[in-house]
Image (cartoon, grey):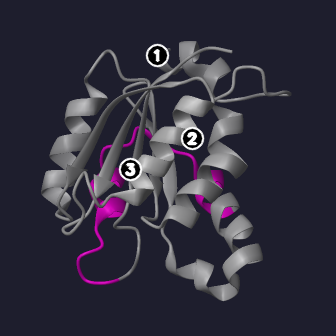
Amino acid sequence: MKKLNITIIIVSDTRTTTTDKSGKKLENLIMKDGHVVISKIIVPDNIYKIRACVSTMIIDSEVDVIICSGGTGITGKDGTPEAIKILLDKEIDGFGEMFRHISYQKIKTSSLQTRALAGVSNSKFIFVLPGSIDACVTAWQEIITHQLNSETKPCNLVMLMPRLKE
């Protein structure tokens, strides 16, 4: 399996490195699956600060994947999708659809409140997840881990990485 370098960005006005349980859980899951977490950043729920942080990671040649957690709801300050969509070269529509479908099995119609999404920017995969621990675990274990595993058949996102620069 190809090891990928992953950056985690936690979007929150209240979490700290001490209180951030979702980020810690994601970090543990990522490392357990053999990938490398090269940085974990907490950024305020402000679309311009989110965009600036993600933009820095998009141009970092060491980063393969960016996972953002938080700010995907529909309240006034939830702006992670708006911050990220403008940066994407291509959106992976199936990720949000699949995440909401899987979430529906657990939380029923409450799953419609998430605006989880994924896409590609500068040959890097970006995933935008809700901020709850359960949502992060669901996204990682049910979808992302399989698509970031070069051995997943019949296809996976890792096998597309060399072709993203075409």
Q: Position of residue 133 (x, y in %)?
A: 50, 63
First along the sequence among labels 3 and 2: 2
SS for callout 2: helix
Q: CA distance from mark 2 to mark 1?
A: 28 Å
**Mark 2 lies on residue:** 29
Q: Position of residue 137 (x, y in %)?
A: 59, 55
Which quadrant holds the N terminus? Answer: top right
| Above or below, 26 relative to 60 | below
Q: Quadrant of residue 160?
A: top right
Q: Residues within 10 Å of mark 3 (few under 14, many from 20)?
A: many
Q: Residues within 10 Å of mark 2 (few under 14, many from 20)?
A: some
* Dot 1 and dot 3 residues touching (CB under 8 Å): no
Residue furthest front in the image = 18
**Mark 3 lies on residue:** 68
Q: Please, what is the three-letter code of the amino acid marked with disc 2?
A: Leu
* Dot 3 and dot 2 residues touching (CB under 8 Å): no
**Mark 1 lies on residue:** 165
| Above or below, 154 relative to 17 | above
Q: Is residue 32 left or right of residue 164?
A: right
Q: Quadrant of residue 139?
A: bottom right
SS for callout 3: strand
* Dot 2 and dot 1 residues touching (CB under 8 Å): no
Q: Is residue 101 left or right of residue 57?
A: right
What is the magenta range?
Answer: 75-97
Residue at 32% from the left image edge and 46% from the top image edge: 9
Q: Residues within 10 Å of mark 1 (few under 14, many from 20)?
A: few
